[in-house]
Amino acid sequence: MMSKIVRTQANFLYPLIMIFGFYIVAHGHLTPGGGFQGGAVIATGVALIAVAYSYKNVKTWIKKTRLTATEAIGLLTFIITALLGISRSFFYNWLANTGLLFGQPVPYGINPGYLNTAGTLPIMNFAVGIEVLGGLGVIIMYYLHYIKEVSKNAV
Amino acid sequence: MIWEFLANNSPALIIAIPLIAAFATSLISRVSTRARNIWVILALVLTEIFVIILLYQVFNFGTKVYVFGASSYNLTLPPDSGGIPIRIIFVVDAMSIFMAFTASTVALAGVIYSISCENEQTGQDKYYTLLLLMTVGMLGMMLTGDLFNFFVFLEINSLASAALVAYRVDRGIAVEAAFKYAIISSLGGLMVLFAIGILYGQYDALNMAMVAYRMQATGFSNLDKIAMALLTVTLAMKAGAIPMHFWVPDGYGKAPGAISAMLVTTTYASLYGLFRMCFTVFGLAANTVTLGWFLIILGVLSMFVGVTMALVQHDIKRLMAYHSVSQTGYMLLGVGVGLATLGTTAFNQYGLAAMEGGIFHLINNSMYKGLLFLTAGAIIYRIGTSDLDKMGGLGHSMKYTMIFFMIGALAIAGIPPFNGFASKLLIYESVYQFNPILSIIAMIVSILTLASFVKVFHSAFMGPKRYDVKEVPLPMLVGMGILTFFIILFGLFPNIAMQYLVTPAATALSDPVGYITRVLGGGSL
């Protein structure tokens, strides 16, 4: 476990990283970024917590099996969203311009960017974000698994 | 109504079903092992059913297209696109569906075999996830009509196969093999991506038909030559042709039994990619005689060097891997002769027959080489070693495995009444008219193959009893039985395979204009 200064910093930064990550995921269809990038940003939050608080503590809070399940759920959401459009064709954007969730039509011309548009694209971005969070989280946890704890007196 | 819906959407469902199954496997394996096994088998059975539905459709109604994300599944040129196919399009002609049939059958046999072969191992849920992803990669490469999409499926396929080769660590040797395979695959993947970038930069399109159409219109430039060299060499490397074969013996030799069998079809997915690039993408613009001779030289080298390397091996799976290289040579030779004579009168005299022989040999080799790898896996499963010198006398107790091995060995050596004979005879006869020396080399290679398998058969199954082992469990025998069924069926009735699978495939592959018109001609049936 790191010193109190590092832990306080981590506590402060963690929600900001989360918000930034979710911002990138949610605005994937409007700004640069998207599901993969946002998910990777969120996964750095996991890495930060694991560095600040040692792996021993973190592994009781964040379980590898849950991260694997998150990954599977993200991937399934993606493919099932694609499959729901199959009455027209696979990957058909069945939500766009329907007036429902993310279904607002995009007005013509220069605009500031409307979040409630683009149909299935934001949903797939969320799915990829969840998947990448799970996948990178598992990778980080497996890497940390092999770190040796060094006592303060050894230095 | 429902039949029509399923038939029209089958190209998408062939990809979607194993993908959903792969992602859900890790969740379902938390319920129980049994549920997971049933789930995985069910997914591949469904995939096989859709492949057969699509085979029926393509045979009766010609090439099918499937446009992803369009408002109608067959709208290849949307009205607002300006005459360019902008979406990912699956173009399923007889050649694609022929390959998909081969791949899904071997995958089904492999997964049934795995159920009992792997049931005492750890990490099975990830094994089946990767196995399904590997199947998706293969099927995607075979069905797609989009260059970038081809690259994506190639990468899915490579990563999943590399992970599966390393699955049984075996004191690090398997990991080394997988590392080699992963390096080769990613290097190849980058070269493919670079070539696709060159083509995209010139023709503003990723659709194979569109690229071919514009390449023919503007002529074959020097950049196209670079792209063609990168694509053909990389895909030949992934197919295990001789100067680039070095990953094959390691990869095949160290993978689990069922995975070795599936790796054969994985390399044939790349071989299919090579044929598709040579015929459809570059066939109209490039000099097909040179390209054909390139394939023929690769083929003859692979045949001869592969079999001579196999003769000296003492590890049963390495030996079979070198034979796999050697058998790939026959396909390259057959299809290469077809490509070299494309568009001349010789094509109708013997070129098409050579292509049919090469393509028929592809499905035959997938079946009997798959069977041989499964029997090798069965031997290793029971006695725990792959060294031929330590085997012996297994025929006393593993009778069914011995019979399956005999069928596979006789088929690979081209002995009637098994399927290897039918396709090899076609290749010999047609290639002899093209160039007698090539045909004679092919026959000599076949004799050496027989010699090598007589050695394996004798040292593994004959002799006094050395191991007190039982026959392998039933699911493993069922997996081998599926492949044996096709070997005997295609051996006794080669005309069935020729009429419904091989001749349509060869005709479709040799007709790039038909392919292009099907995609760019509007999309309505």
Image: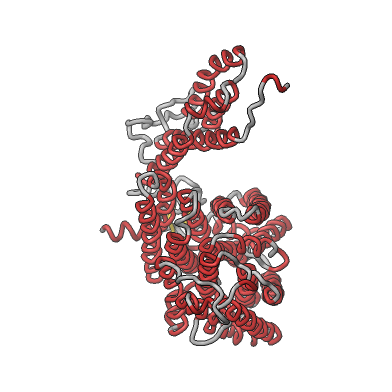
Residue B147 visible in this rendered orientation of the protein: no
What percent of the width, then of the height, locates residue A113? Answer: 47, 25
Q: Residue at x 65, y 73 (%)?
A: B389
Q: How many marks?
A: 0
What percent of the width, then of the height, locates residue A110? Answer: 50, 26
Is B455 drawn above or below residue A150 in the view shown?
below
Snapshot quadrant of residue B213: bottom right
Quarter the N terminus of chain B occupies: bottom left
Snapshot quadrant of residue A6: top right
Residue B464 visible in this rendered orientation of the protein: yes
Front-lying residue, B421 or B388: B388
Q: Residue at x 66, y 25 (%)?
A: A150
Q: Residue at x 58, y 76 (%)?
A: B392
Front-lying residue, A100 or B39: B39
Colouring chosen for the image of the structure:
secondary structure
Is B458 drawn above or below residue B15 in the view shown?
below
Q: Which residue occupies the extreme left position in the image?
A: B1
What percent of the width, then of the height, locates residue B471? Answer: 45, 71
What percent of the width, then of the height, locates residue B251? Answer: 62, 60
Quarter the C terminus of chain B occupies: bottom left
Q: Residue at x 41, y 52 (%)?
A: B16
